[in-house]
Each structure stands twice: as C-alpha cells, then as structure tokens.
Image (tube, helix red, strand yellow):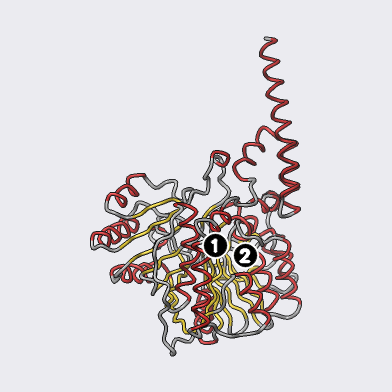
Amino acid sequence: MDGFRIAWWVVVIIFYFLGVIAALDAIWKGRTSQGSVAWAVSLILFPYLAVPLYWMFGDRKFHGYLNARRSGDLKINDITHDLKDKLIQKDLISGNEHQDFRVLENLAKMPFTKYNRAEILINGDATFSAIFESIDQAQKYILVQFYKIHDDKLGTKLQTKLIKKAKEGIRVYLLYDDIGCTPLPRSYMEKLRDNGIQVHNFKSRKGWAHRLRLNFRNHRKIVVVDGKTAFVGGLNVSDKYMGIHPKYGYWRDTHLKIEGPSVQCVQLPFISDWFWATREVPELNWEPTYFADWKNNVLVLPSGPADELETCGIFFVHSINSAKKRLWISSPYFVPDQQVLCALQLAGLRGVDVRLMIPLKSDLFITNLSALSFLQEITKAGIKVYRYSKGFLHQKTMLIDDDRSMIGTANLDNRSFRINFEINILFSNQEFARKVEDMMLEDFANSFQITEEDYTKKPFWYKLAVKVARLLAPIQ
C-alpha cells in the first residue's frame, strides 16, 4: 500500500511540475493575453487534464516551416523573386499606390496583379462542375489541395477524374491535411498512389516532439490546372458541401474560378506546403496567361502560423479600419479577438454600414454559442447581425465600400487568425464588387436580423452556457 501511495504522489508531483513548466511556456510564448491566462490557470489548477491538452493544442508557432521554405537551394525563394520580376517586366502589376494597398501587398509579400478574370461559383454544384471541367481539360499538370476529403460520392468522383488524367500522362499532385482527413480510409489514397498520382499529407505533426500536436491545420482549398486556371474558396470534398447531407441539408458556400497572373500567385503557397511535406518542388508553369480585357486587380494573400507576423488577423483589422461606407462580412464562425472586435465597433461608431452574417445552425455547437456572446458588444456600436436561415452558411466573404471584396478560406475566428494555414483572394474592382453585393443581398434575403434582446431574453442556463463558451474563445 505504501508503494502505491508513493507512486501516486510521484505522479501528482510530476503532473504539477509539468503544469508549472507548461504554464510558464504559455505565458512566455502566448500571442494573446487571454489565451495565455486561460492556459496558465488551467495548467496550474487542473494539470492532469490541461497538460495533455496543452501538448495537443498549445503550440502558437508552426516551427520549421519557414526554415524548410528557405532551404533546398532557396528554390522557392528564387521562383518567388523571378515571378515578381516577370510581373514587373510584363507590366502585370496594378500600380495602385494607395497606402491601404501597400499594407496588403506587404502582408502578402506579392503585388496586386492586373488583367485577371474571375467567376463567382455559388454552392457545390457550380463549384465542382467547374473544377471537374477544368480537370478534364488539363494538358500538363493538376494541383489539388483540400482540408477535408471524404470517401463518398463526390470524393469518389474526384478520385476517378484524377486517376483518368494520370493515366493520360498528366502529372497530378494531391496534398491533404492529415487531421482534417482523419476519417478518410487509407485505401482511398493508396488507390490514387497506385495509379501514379503523387499524394502526401501536410504533416502538421512532423517530428517526434510534435506527434500529439493537433492544433495546426492546413485549411487551404486550392486547385490549379496547367498554371492557367485556379480555384479557391470555402468548399471541401464531401457530399455535405453539395447540400445533400441528411443533418445539414442546404449548404451555402462560395468558391472562385480565376485566370490571369494571380494563378501563378496561387501556386506559390501550394509549392511551399508541398515542399514542407516532401522536400521537393514540382516543375510548374510560371508564365502568366492574360488578356487586356480581363479587368480584375487581384491580390493572393496566404497566411499561417509560420508567418513572422499574424498575417490573417492584421489583414482583417486593416480591412475593417479602411472601410468608409460599407462593410459586409459573411462567416460561419464568429469568435473575434479583441483587436478585430474593437475594429468592428469603431467601424460601426463612425457610421459605416456594418453587417455581419452568421449561420442559424452550425456544425460547431461551442463556436456557435461563442458568437452570441459578442452580440451585445457589437449591436450597441450600430452593427447589424443577421442569421442565415435557409441552410448552413459556410462561405467566407467580405465586401468593403463599392470597390473591394474578398473570397477565401479564412473564418472570423482565432483559429484562422493565428493557427490555420489559409488563403484569401482580394479584389479591387467595382464591377466584381457589384457581383459580390448581388450575391450577399440574396443571402441577406434568406436571413433575419437579431438584436441584443435575442440574448438578454434567453433563460439563465442559456446565458451561462454562452459565457462559458466565450471563455474558450482564445483556444477555439
């Protein structure tokens, strides 16, 4: 019995020691005071539970990615510098010297390009019809990257299409997130490999010290065909994104088809991710296709936890602060940090027409509750909040004034700001902004406005659940 007690106290001491060490690490490396405090208190008071969770979710920086990108004879950096030179030589840079655009270009480390054509793809049918049509027409190579791929009807169709092109001699590269694709059976990827397709997971848990790391996700969704056409947006590969899931039903999402010099810019984050996973850089087409009657000025803005700055969060704060007349945002998850929350409040207080659209029903219960905890703070500043009721709203879009818009993969939450690898496409074009406006107006028509009374009139137990969910916001 004495031996058991000694062993028990040894375990207790070890856990509390690890809790203190982890708490100091959280304080030293934390990016936000809220997140650091939440982790430190949990690690000291409940080390048995908090220490394993910290090992899985506590990392703030994706170590090694940037160093890997800079290695390998600096090939990716050479490609990036050559592409910038080529854009200048061919007069493909938009040339807008406005300070707002210089900030965004500095964040993206690439310029706005002109002579781009873009098409908004609304929902799954339009998106995957366009993607599959482009895959069918591929002549040289296909790049595919998704956060989630399911072995269902849509996943099987993608698999069949890629195998067919590989048998025709087309080079196919498929990159997937190992956490997002956890339910995917190994046989799905093995079949692709057996047919000559290069398939790799992103390896967010690379290295023995990070085997338990579950925090970082590659949330990008990219398809590029021959360096001429690119697809980016909110849709993953699953039947539920086609609106046929028995639980979620109608799935409202938005994707992009783009052509022009911006396609080469989309290839850059793909080859960076590919190099991290494989230590190889595929040979791709870096000659932009463009025509003078393609009018869109486009900036490709990748972001992630390996960035030297918090690229995604800074982008949202800057975009919100730059709005003068209108700021419409659609996001399935609304868990802003203090900087974004203050920027939204300031926009509302200075008279900007700020509208936020979030789903009525969500696939993440805790996150959905967290969003309601911000309701009083933002509505008091004049911000209008709408809940989309036709189905599940999953699109990530933003409309700023009359000439700027964004469609991408980033949500308005801490995970996209700091933890996920994301990619957003920014437009500076009035005609395209009007198309985004028309799309969002239809979405607002399928939504209803809520006020702070929708929270204050709820029963006590509901308000308590919302408050508790809010406490988890920094680590969601």
Which quadrant of the figure contains the N terminus?
A: top right
The type of residue carrying mark 2 is Cys
Where 189 sits versus 378, above or below? above
Question: Alpha-carbon distance for marks 2 and 1?
Answer: 8 Å
Question: Could you tell me which secondary element the residue under label 1 belongs to?
Answer: strand
**Residue 51 locus on image (x, y percent):** 66, 37
Do the residues bearing badges 2 and 1 touch, measured as CB atoms within 8 Å? Answer: yes
Q: Is residue 460 visible?
A: no
The image quarter in which residue 308 lies: bottom right
In this figure, which residue is indicated by the disc labeled 1?
A: 422
Q: Residue reaching furthest bottom?
A: 293
Q: Residue reaching furthest left?
A: 168
Q: Is residue 1 left or right of residue 252?
A: right
Q: Residues within 10 Å of mark 2 (few under 14, many from 20)?
A: many
Q: Residues within 10 Å of mark 1 (few under 14, many from 20)?
A: many
**Residue 378 locus on image (x, y percent):** 71, 68
Q: Nearer the viewer, residue 468 or 454?
A: 468
**x 57%, y 43%: residue:** 213
The image quarter in which residue 119 lies: bottom left
**x 25%, y 62%: residue:** 169
Where 238 sits versus 50, above or below? below
Specify the label residue 312 is tagged with. 2
Q: Is residue 218 left or right of residue 449?
A: left
The type of residue carrying mark 1 is Glu
Specify the label residue 185 is tagged with. none
Q: Is residue 405 left or right of residue 348?
A: left
Q: Is residue 33 visible?
A: yes
Where 23 sits versus 256, above or below? above
Q: Nearer the viewer, residue 283 or 473?
A: 283
